[in-house]
Amino acid sequence: MQYRIDKRSGNKLSVLGLGCMRFPGMFGRADLNKTEEMIMRAVEKGVNYFDTAWMYPGSEETLGVILDRNNAREKIYIATKLPLILCKTASDFDKYFNQSLERLKTQTVDYYLMHSMTDAQQWAKLKSWGIEEWIHSKKKSGQIKQAGFSFHGSADEFLKILDDYGWECCLIQLNYSDENFQAGIRGLRAAAQKMPVMIMEPLLGGKLATGLPKGAVKIFKNAGASGRSTADLSPAGWALNWVWNHEEVTLLLSGMSNMEQLEENIRLADASAAGMLGETEKAVYSDVLKFIRRACKIGCTGCNYCMPCPKGVNIPGCFSSYNTMHSLGFVAGMQQFITSTGLTSETGSGPGLCVKCGKCESHCPQKIPIMKELATVRRRMEPWWIKLIGVCARAFFGTKRKK
Ligand code: SF4
Ligand code: SF4
């Protein structure tokens, strides 16, 4: 296994982290034996970072039981997350944290993350509830070793949150299909100067492994046939290598749900290195991307020059989701749209917030008619049933959306 150093804590972290959202078995009811086999095989091969969350059904409990009965807690680092969406008062911080400790059968959490931050306003609200003091007290007691946040929002909001607290780690989405999506490369570079950066969705929910258009798969296959280092590399392997190639990345999370995926990922991680990709390989990604983007509808490069929008619309996030829907399918597009426009959050950042003030369009180097395209995105990606899901989710979580 390859390791990279978390410079803040000195921890030596495996470049492959095990994402614990989808264990083998039914969602929420993991097959304990199969999961145990997989987790212990990962530990044996040197994987030492396990990422779970209070919100992942059955995940903390399953991980806790397996680590306990194999005496493996001290061999690994556990990352788990505070379900911000469920927190209504300051007392909820303790409530969910204690439940996580109990489920994980542990006294300490190595990396404790605020789950799914989307904007600075959300962080400001947490601060008004005393979250900074709460984190400080947990660190002082030794129950939290490193404090951080996971993020789904625009790059501008990410940078604001990043600079507003002494975070010790962050978890962001990154893959080769869109390096400007959410925090993106800009966020990665800024964060890596201060803290370890963990990467989620390196395979875009599996789309870059098994959902690529046939032509893109062929490009990878032909490239593999001509280069020794890339021989027999699957599309998933190409996608993971792209992430590991960045020296700013500390580790990536892969949500493996069977032994075959685990063994492949371990092999890839063993052979990975920062700066491993040469010009020939980079040209292959570029060809694949051209192929994928041919199916894209809006020529947005994610440069962010149109941001910030005074009404809080995540313009590049909306366009990227719309393009993903056309290039990689409806589910992948909607998944991106929901996470990047804060469907359940207080303010949201979807296309429906646009008041057509026109401030953004003159900044766009691609001359995209932003207002018109946002209306299209809204029609296609905010149908009545998505709005209904948002309303129900906000009612369920007790989130009041500001007008
Ligand atoms: S036109 Fe719409 S998207 Fe553009 S800045 Fe104004 S409100 Fe924001
Ligand atoms: S300025 Fe244009 S190309 Fe850049 S992110 Fe905004 S819409 Fe996209």
Image (cartoon, grey):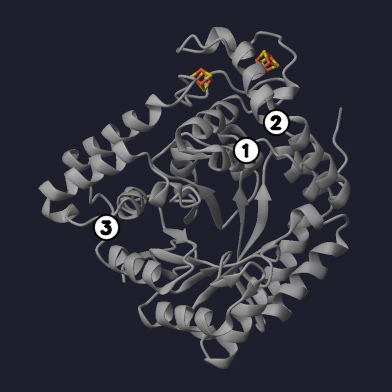
Q: Quadrant of residue 56?
A: bottom right
Residue 107: percent from the left, percent from the top? 67, 82
> How many angstroms separate mark 3 from mark 1 (CA)?
30 Å
Q: Earlier in the sequence, mark 2 or mark 3?
A: 3
The answer to whether residue 383 is above or below residue 139 is: above
The answer to whether residue 398 is above or below residue 54 is: above
Looking at the picture, tell me which residue is in the foreground, 194 or 289: 289
Q: Earlier in the sequence, mark 2 or mark 1?
A: 1
Question: Can the viewer see residue 278 in this picture?
Answer: no
Do the numbered discs 2 and 1 sit on residues whose CB atoms are within 8 Å? yes
Q: Residue at x 46, y 45 (%)?
A: 174
Q: Residue at x 73, y 39 (%)?
A: 343
Q: Residues within 10 Å of mark 1 (few under 14, many from 20)?
A: many
Residue position for label 2: 349
Residue 142: percent from the left, percent from the top? 66, 76
> How many angstroms separate mark 2 from mark 1 (CA)?
8 Å
Q: Quadrant of residue 294?
A: top left
Q: Residues within 10 Å of mark 2 (few under 14, many from 20)?
A: many
The quadrant the C terminus occupies is: top right
Looking at the picture, tell me which residue is in the foreground, 342 or 95: 342
Q: Earlier in the sequence, mark 3 or mark 1?
A: 3
Q: Residue at x 71, y 10 (%)?
A: 356
Residue position for label 1: 340
Residue position for label 3: 273
Residue 323, label in figure: none
> How many angstroms separate mark 2 from mark 3 (CA)?
37 Å
- Left or right: where 324 falls relative to 389: left
Q: Residues within 10 Å of mark 3 (few under 14, many from 20)?
A: some
Residue type of the residue flagged with mark 1: Ser
Q: Give the SS element for disc 3.
A: loop
